[in-house]
Image (cartoon, rainbow, N blue to C red):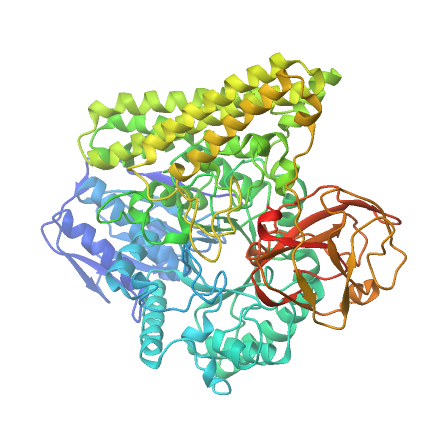
């Protein structure tokens, strides 16, 4: 569909500043959002020195009148034509508007719908403010390119509550004071509507136990009655205030997460990987009650993470969630299906979504844009195909998720953002945007060390505004766009020349983090905190750390990883796409340019100098981070070269670069020590790269100062290795250093399994001929656990009960096979619970040779003293190749 955007203000000197009151005529029984738009227009007129009056009728529509009406109304169309605007069929389009005024005539605001009238009023208000009066002539026709445009708020915390798991946070005033703050909602929602955003997502693991009562399950309620009353009142208030601004409120929830009291009453875990009857009954009734109580609030289910297995997800969607929505429709008297947004995370959407469409029709889909980072405007590969497949089935949104490579710094690269929006439309077929804030887990506070805390929607105004601007119109020409951003930044910092430099600095800085993660990172997921750096081993041996191929196969333009580049160099093969040396040059160039741009702006800034100083410090941080990565990537290149040349000069050069990277990291530490509370807003065990983020729900390793000793030790260890090589200890230096595994005392308590000794000739299952042919010395002689392979493959094995008197790690062997029946290794990219017991990265890459089986990779799960149930995440068969003391399996 061709977009039409005609903007004329003929003879803007002809601004009418009438002495008489200006009447704003709204239709009788106008919708709340139309009334809100009229109020915003009146406020702009008052500020311009006019005297507006909002009325519902006017005679003759004289020149001092603004008339609001439907674009489809015959009288409005006649009046528009008289003012020089003739609407073609289908114009102005959903949520669109036309504004027309002939000289000496009334101003006509015609909306395609109530939202169109709202946005028309906002557009006219902006022109009144700019002209300091009512323009004499107007001709504007516009509508949004994307049907849904809006951010999310996480009803989640940076830590895990005691006795709970990730995502489990009831709605309480202690956990989420902002939720009960009406002043916050007014300011935040006004910001959204100012940017013409029309959807707001609230994210929660299990919201129903805080928002609805299910008569059959009174004990499922997770908050006391007074808190429940507050929750209901606030939720209804927020929904009404959203609707008044043309914003659709959508409540997201994970599956299957049960209310804690319901789970405890029924002796169930709170997070289920497969349905059980009581969970099915409660969730269907809770969803029905939610639809009944909040009929205009949307629902967004995430079928993945806890709930596993395609068939389980299909049945849960088609027999629990969607029937619950239909039950609620009947009870609420709704005639049309409310929209339901299905998040395609951690599931096979091409198998699941077609099945949901057989039982329900008004379905939207949502898929992450670049995973959980911002990496490219050239998405491709299998993830691109997922987007395109979903777009063929119905309305589809892209989710700009987590932003783990941008945290915690400001991001205002509007050129990068514009190209991403264009890619979402043109490469992915999206018609909607679902936008994360830059510090999701700690909403609403920003990560800066200030008192009081900065609020994210104020600090990151340009982040929200850029995505909103381009989802309304992705194709704004560069000259017009640059002038717009210079004006907006000048409003912030007081000077046009400073604003031009700041804009250039934003656009240079914004190129660094995407390039770093897509060429050097382990994952685009929030498992990696990019600004905290990476170890040399993670760069040289990424396969040891659960590397995610999607990062470079789908979320990056074509190019080469460090290992690919060195291999091609020594094979004398041509390079393809981006190369590591190219990226090193580019991030150093962009970050240097950004620092220079902000330095040029500094003496010109006249407003908000404290915030400018923070912005300039961010540029210095991004410069030090880029230098750190550039030097360490060069060190990795020379370590990889050494494996081909065995020339100690390569290792010595690597050492020089490694020392340089440490110097730059120290600079980064000094720049952030007193300016930032944290690098990553999620500070738990789900964060794994460069080191684990915390255990037992307690935050750890979230600040650059905490990682400095890690990198100092890394250089000392490298020096020791280099000294050993120079002394002739080649074999020792090349050996894979595995910590000695020390067997731990344990007893198997269940009858479905038995102990055995891990050694050559031992069967690894009780019912099969799979026999160990060779085993790594680290595992040889340990006591393992074996069980029926057939029962495990048929999902009939159940948990294995065991007890121990000391902290242990159970060594789980996964068969590297795509054949059905073999359990897959834990994947914290798609399963947040996977990290709670540890073991989301491989411990031993080639553990044993077993007759009839492919390669065996060992992971470990952690348990404390006591009695436990061993049941690794997923379905299918697996091996237990030892139980060792916790300190002996690190």
Q: Is residue 599 left or right of residue 2?
A: left
Q: Is residue 656 above or below residue 270?
A: above
The residue shown at (14%, 52%) is 46
In the rendered image, residue 779, in percent from the top left (x then y), is placed at: 73, 47
Q: Nearer the viewer, residue 486 or 813?
A: 813
Q: Nearer the viewer, residue 287 or 276?
A: 276
Q: Nearer the viewer, residue 538 or 79?
A: 538
Q: Examine the image and state in which quarter residue 68 appears.
A: bottom left
The residue shown at (12%, 56%) is 21
Q: Is residue 130 above or below residue 564?
A: below
In the rendered image, residue 623, in percent from the top left (x then y), is placed at: 40, 26
In the rendered image, residue 761, in percent from the top left (x then y), is placed at: 87, 51
In the rendered image, residue 351, in percent from the top left (x then y), is placed at: 71, 59
Number of on-image labels: 0
Work out which residue is located at the far left of the displayed protein and give it.
Answer: 19
The residue shown at (46%, 76%) is 290
Q: Is residue 548 left or right of residue 286?
A: right
Q: Is residue 359 visible?
A: no
Q: Nearer the viewer, residue 825 or 309?
A: 825
Q: Is residue 408 visible?
A: yes
């Amino acid at each position: 569909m061709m977009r039409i955007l005609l903007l004329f203000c003929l003879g803007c000197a002809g601004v009418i500043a009438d002495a008489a009151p200006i009447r704003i005529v709204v239709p009788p029984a106008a919708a709340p959002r139309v009334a809100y738009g009229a109020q915003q227009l009146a406020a702009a007129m008052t500020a311009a020195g006019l005297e507006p009056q909002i009325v519902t009728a006017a005679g003759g529509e004289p020149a001092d009148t603004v008339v609001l009406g439907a674009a489809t109304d015959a009288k409005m169309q006649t009046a528009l034509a008289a003012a020089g605007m003739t609407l073609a069929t289908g114009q102005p389009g959903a949520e669109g508007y036309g504004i027309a005024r002939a000289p000496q005539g009334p101003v006509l605001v015609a909306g395609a719908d109530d939202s169109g009238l709202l946005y028309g009023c906002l557009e006219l208000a902006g022109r009144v403010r700019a002209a300091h009066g009512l323009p004499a002539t107007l001709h504007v026709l516009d509508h949004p390119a994307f049907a849904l445009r809006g951010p999310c708020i996480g009803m989640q915390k940076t830590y895990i509550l005691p006795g709970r798991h990730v995502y489990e946070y009831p709605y309480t005033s202690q956990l989420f004071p902002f939720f009960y703050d009406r002043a916050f909602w007014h300011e935040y929602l006004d910001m959204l509507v100012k940017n013409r955003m029309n959807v707001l997502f609230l994210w929660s693991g299990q919201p129903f136990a805080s928002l609805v009562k299910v008569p059959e399950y009174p004990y499922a309620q997770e908050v006391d009655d007074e808190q429940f009353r507050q929750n209901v009142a606030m939720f209804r208030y927020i929904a009404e205030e959203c609707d008044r601004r043309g914003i659709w409120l959508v409540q997201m929830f994970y599956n299957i997460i049960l209310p804690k009291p319901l789970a405890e009453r029924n002796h169930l875990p709170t997070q289920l990987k497969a349905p059980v009857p009581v969970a099915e009954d409660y969730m269907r009734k809770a969803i029905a009650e939610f639809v009944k109580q909040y009929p205009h609030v949307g629902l967004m289910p995430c079928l993945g993470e806890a709930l596993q297995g395609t068939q389980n997800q299909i049945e849960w969607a088609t027999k629990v969630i969607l029937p619950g929505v239909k039950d609620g429709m009947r009870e609420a008297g709704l005639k049309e299906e409310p929209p339901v947004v299905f998040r395609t995370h951690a599931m096979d959407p091409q198998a699941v979504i077609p099945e949901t469409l057989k039982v329900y029709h008004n379905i939207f889909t949502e898929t992450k844009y670049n995973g959980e980072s911002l990496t490219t405007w050239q998405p491709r590969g299998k993830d691109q195909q997922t987007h395109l497949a979903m777009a063929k089935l119905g309305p589809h949104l892209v989710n700009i998720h987590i932003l783990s490579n941008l945290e915690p710094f400001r991001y205002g690269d509007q050129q990068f953002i514009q190209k991403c929006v264009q890619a979402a439309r043109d490469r992915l077929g999206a018609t909607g945007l679902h936008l994360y804030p830059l510090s999701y887990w700690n909403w609403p506070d920003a990560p800066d060390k200030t008192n009081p805390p900065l609020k994210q929607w104020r600090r990151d105004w340009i982040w929200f505004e850029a995505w909103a601007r381009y989802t309304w119109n992705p194709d704004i020409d560069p000259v017009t766009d640059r002038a717009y951003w210079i004006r907006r930044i000048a409003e912030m910092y007081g000077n046009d020349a400073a604003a031009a430099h700041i804009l250039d600095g934003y656009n240079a800085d914004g190129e660094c983090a995407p390039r770093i993660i897509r060429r050097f990172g382990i994952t685009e997921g929030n498992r990696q905190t990019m600004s905290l750096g990476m170890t040399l081993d993670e760069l040289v041996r990424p396969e040891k750390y659960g590397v995610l191929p999607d990062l470079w196969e789908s979320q990056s333009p074509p190019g080469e990883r460090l290992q690919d580049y060195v291999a091609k160099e020594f094979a004398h093969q041509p390079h393809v796409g981006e190369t590591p040396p190219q990226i090193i040059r580019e991030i150093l160039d962009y970050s240097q340019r950004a620092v220079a741009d902000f330095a040029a702006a500094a003496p010109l800034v006249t407003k908000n100098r404290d915030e400018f100083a923070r912005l300039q410090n961010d540029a210095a941080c991004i410069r030090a981070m880029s230098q750190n990565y550039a030097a360490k990537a060069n060190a990795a290149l020379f370590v990889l070269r050494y494996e081909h040349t065995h020339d100690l000069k390569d290792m010595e050069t690597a050492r020089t670069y490694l020392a340089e990277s440490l110097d730059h990291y120290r600079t980064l530490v000094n720049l952030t020590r007193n300016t930032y509370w944290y690098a990553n807003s999620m500070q738990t065990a789900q964060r794994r790269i460069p080191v684990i983020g915390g255990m037992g729900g307690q935050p750890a390793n979230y600040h650059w100062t905490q990682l400095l000793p890690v990198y100092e030790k890394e250089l000392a260890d490298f020096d020791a290795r280099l000294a050993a090589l120079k002394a002739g200890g080649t074999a020792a230096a090349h050996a894979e250093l595995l910590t000695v595994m020390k067997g731990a005392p344990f007893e198997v308590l269940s009858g479905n399994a038995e102990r055995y000794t891990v050694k050559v000739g031992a069967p690894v299952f009780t019912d099969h001929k799979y026999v160990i042919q060779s085993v790594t010395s680290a595992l040889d002689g340990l006591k393992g656990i074996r069980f029926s392979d057939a029962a495990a493959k048929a999902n009939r094995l159940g948990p294995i009960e065991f007890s121990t008197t000391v902290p242990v790690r159970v060594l789980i062997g996964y068969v590297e096979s795509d054949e059905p029946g073999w359990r897959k290794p834990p994947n914290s990219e798609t399963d947040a619970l996977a990290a709670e017991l540890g073991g989301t990265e491989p411990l031993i890459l080639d553990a044993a040779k077993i007759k009839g089986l492919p390669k065996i990779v060992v992971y470990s799960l952690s348990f404390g003293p006591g009695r436990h149930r061993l049941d690794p995440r997923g379905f299918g068969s697996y091996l237990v190749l030892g139980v060792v003391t916790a300190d002996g399996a690190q």
